[in-house]
Image (tube, rainbow, N blue to C red):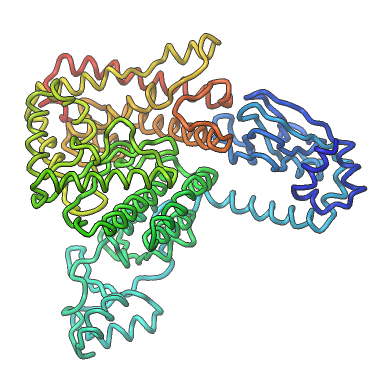
Amino acid sequence: MDGLARFLGSNPPFCSLADPDLEKVTAAARVVDHPAGALIVDAFASAGDDLFVVMAGQVELWTTDGGADEPADEIVGQGCVFGHTTALTGAPIGPRAVALGPVRLVEIPRAAVAAAFSSPEGVRFLAQDLAEDRVRAAAPARFRTVDDLVVSAPVLGHAGMTVADAARVMTERSSRYLAVPRGNGEFGLVTDGVLREHVLAAGRSADTPVQDVMIPRAATARTGTPTADVLHRFAEDRLDQLLVVDVSGALRGAVDPADFLTSPSGAGMMLRENVRRAESIDQVVALGRQLPVLLGDLVRQRREASETTAVYSTVVDAVQRRVLSLVLAGRAALDEAEVTWMLLGSNARREPTLGSDIDSAVVFAESVDSPARATAYRAAFAEVADVLRRAGLRVDSHGATPSSPTFSRTRSQWRAAAHLWLDSPLDNQGMLMASLLLDGRPIQGDPAQPVVNEVFADVRDHPGTMKLLVRESLSHRAQVRSVRDVLVGRGGTFDLKGHALRPIVEIARWAALSVRSSELSTRARLAAASGSMLLPAEQAKTLIEVFEVLQRVRLRQQLAQFERGEPVTDVVWMRRLAPLDRSLVAQSVREIATVQKRLFNIVQYTSPSEWGAR
């Protein structure tokens, strides 16, 4: 009983109670254990008489009475209180609570908690809870696309105006930019930075024509573009402004990095900026340790899984770039300009989770022409990997890292190796390397398309090789039977990645390649190949939906593993999944298996030259 009193007294709203009142609450409380998947309370069906405090484990909460197939609105852990709203009001207004895993709860009758909620701490607790409910209710509808970030009408100028005219208009409109129409949907751009660098610092006159100093072709985004994609544009292209245009090419406004501070992606933007400005490796390590918190916040905002991982990957990219720069800066004989750092796998596709390994490769400049110099760089890359591990990231343990000669070569060496893999995919791990490198994305150094991608883009011109690669990818079957075994008690675990997500990623990669798409993300690849022989539109739509469902389950499960202090893996105990998630996983795997079966027949009896036909 003393331990229960200490536990309650350390959490709001009970922490402000006087000892006699706390003793009354403790005496009325009972500690109850619930198994994974158990329905704890459904306060939409009837008003509850108890409130609940989580002692151990996690609970999924539905705060709106939606359909049974809707994902939980939030996941709460130790110290969190729920059920108080319906208990205090006596009205059936939710929530519905289900044990995410084995859960221990303190259940307290309504009559015993009046003192707690009438205290100053209790009033603050209720006020904060109400504010958070309002935020949760608004979050799903806001900041989904770039349109939501545009807050003012466009600021336009013309080619005949002077620098002084442009500065005056920007001042009058309190704008950090001015756009100059050039025709054909293109715009010149004047920003505060342009005026500082090209006018003041260059000693130009205020009468200088604005077209002499403006950025000749401004970066633009189409209305409807997801905010996560816009965030990547800022991160990777180092933009000050991004103009927003509609389908007709008309300017609708502009966004800059500061606009993200008001969006749910703002925390990711701020963390990325702090990483970029870090002056020491220890600072980057400390910031990298915040990544699980960022990911947890994004998941609890009920954002789409693809958007969540895209924002998360922006910060992971920034950590890697900064670590590489700091490590190479500490080695005077090495030059960062000779290195193009390329991400592979899920990080390249902007789909990483807490359990994702960082696979990477390096393209050396041709000036790295001696074994000794390459060895010196690889030693630095090994240090980069060590720092990333200190920052809480997982570096591939199977050798897909630039500290290995296999994954760090000059441009010409990569080209020669890629041609060998195309000609003889069964030799020297050719099929594995093809799959890895087709997902390559450079995050530092030469932004041009990596040479390996250039070579593999022509894999359609090697029909035998392409057919072999696709057939190999289809060998990673969605294991419907394994899931059924689990559901009826004949198994205990399920590999979300190996038996469900990986088959979708493989299908998306080769279907996109068949239509010569350069997209990287799985969703974008499926969309690009939709309607082709390999991937009919309805099946593409299904796989996009299934991928979202599985990634959402994967994100939640890995966060739960992390918060329980367990190893973060893609293998889940099915009994720990909520009943809804178990059903979604089983149905998803059946859908994937159906697509795979059709694809296998298509690949058997048609030529790769036909696969891209629509």
Q: Left of 61 or right of it: where is 456?
A: left
Could you say where residue 513 lies in the image, as x and y percent from the top left? 18, 33
- Does 415 appear above or below 367? above
**Image point (14%, 39%), residue name:** 452
Could you say where residue 99 lies in the image, as x and y percent from the top left? 65, 29
Q: Quadrant of residue 325?
A: bottom left
Q: Quadrant of residue 271?
A: bottom left
- Does 153 appear above or below 103? below
Q: Left of 97 or right of it: where is 9?
A: right
**Image point (50%, 50%), residue name:** 141
Q: Residue furthest front?
A: 372
Q: Quadrant of residue 468?
A: top left
Note whether residue 538 is visible: no
Quadrant in which the C terminus is drawn: top left
Note whether residue 448 is visible: yes
Between 436 and 263, the one lying in front of the other is 436
Between 239 and 176, the one lying in front of the other is 239
- Does 564 appear above or below 258? above
Quadrant in which the N terminus is drawn: top right
Could you say where residue 456 lies in the image, as x and y percent from the top left? 13, 35
Q: Left of 410 or right of it: where is 157?
A: right
**Image point (59%, 49%), residue name:** 137
**Image point (27%, 35%), residue name:** 400
Q: Residue furthest top?
A: 490
Q: Left of 84 or right of it: where is 216?
A: left
